Image: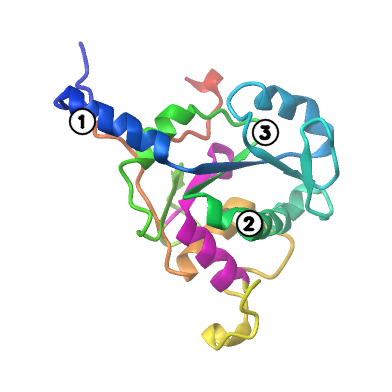
Amino acid sequence: MTQRSDYLWISPGLITYFKHNQKSIKLLCWITTYPSNYEKALAVKNTWCRRCIFVSSANNTELPTVNLNVTETRKNLWWKTKAALTYVYDNYYRDYDWFLKADDDTYVIVENLRSFLSQQTLLEPTYFGAKFKMMVRQGFMSGGAGYVMPKEVLKKIVTEGLQVIRKLSWINEGKDLCSSKNEGDEDVEVGLCMEKVGVKAGDSRDSLNRHRFSWLFFTYY
């Protein structure tokens, strides 16, 4: 049985418009990696993420990596993520519209992601990913599947949640809305922080209720 395409009704002119709209989307991706995984990260770089930046706890000239100066342990993933969010905001916020976080074992079909993002608005405080409905009231996005956010969400989580820019702001009396601890599950902590700064956990399923983000390995399918 054939399935209906989301774009079955679109005229050739509109197809041209959507393709142009996808290309006009300025998307930055950052890949979280670590020293013992650089070989795997290189394989990822040579496939879908040739234009992504790689963040780590040590320098590597072949990828190359951005050294976030954090202590590399699994327990410190939240610390590493906060450092990455801050770095990306400080260096790339003005130049891109959307920001994608992924790991060095994530595979993204960028054309499909761009197609999805072309249907979203930059002004809506929403982020997208593989949504888990637990531990956070509105749910959170599984870190393994990656998650994507518009630039204003990146700004909110850094300047309002992490208080990197406005440490003495009257908003929340200068206290971090995001956890100030280094330890914590990255995806859950991001979800909690997003909720506290008023960012919605969006629904990225298609018109047939199929998930666009998956945290499972291909061997599970």
Residue at the (53%, 59%) spot, across then down: 154
Instruction: Compare residues 161 and 119 and report the one nearer the observer.
Output: 119
Give SS at disc 1.
helix
Q: Return the residue at label 3.
A: 104
Which percent across, then down, holds residue 27?
50, 42
User: Is mark 2 in CB contact (under 8 Å) with mark 3?
Assistant: no
Q: Amino acid at mark 1?
A: Leu
The segment highlighted magenta reads 139-162
> How packed is label 3: few (under 14 Cα within 10 Å), some, or many (20 or more)?
many
Task: Judge left or right: residue 61 versus residue 45.
Answer: right
In which quadrant of the rendered image does the N terminus lie?
Answer: top left
Picture colour scheme: rainbow
Residue 85, disc? 2
In terms of sequence position, does the residue under pointer 1 or pointer 3 come before the other?
1
Q: Is residue 160 above or below residue 132?
A: below
The reply to whether residue 210 is in sight is no
Q: Quadrant of residue 93?
A: bottom right
Measure the alpha-carbon separation of dots 2 and 1: 36 Å
Residue at the (46%, 61%) spot, across then down: 152
Which percent across, then down, holds residue 198?
42, 68
Give SS at disc 3.
loop
The secondary structure that dominates the magenta segment is helix
Q: Is residue 111 above or below residue 59?
A: above
Measure the alpha-carbon separation of dots 1 and 3: 36 Å
Q: Return the residue at label 1.
A: 14
The reply to whether the magenta stretch includes residue 157 is: yes
Which percent across, then down, holds residue 190?
56, 58
The reply to whether the magenta stretch includes residue 161 is: yes
Measure the alpha-carbon separation of dots 2 and 3: 17 Å
Q: Amino acid at mark 2?
A: Leu
Q: Amino acid at mark 3?
A: Asp
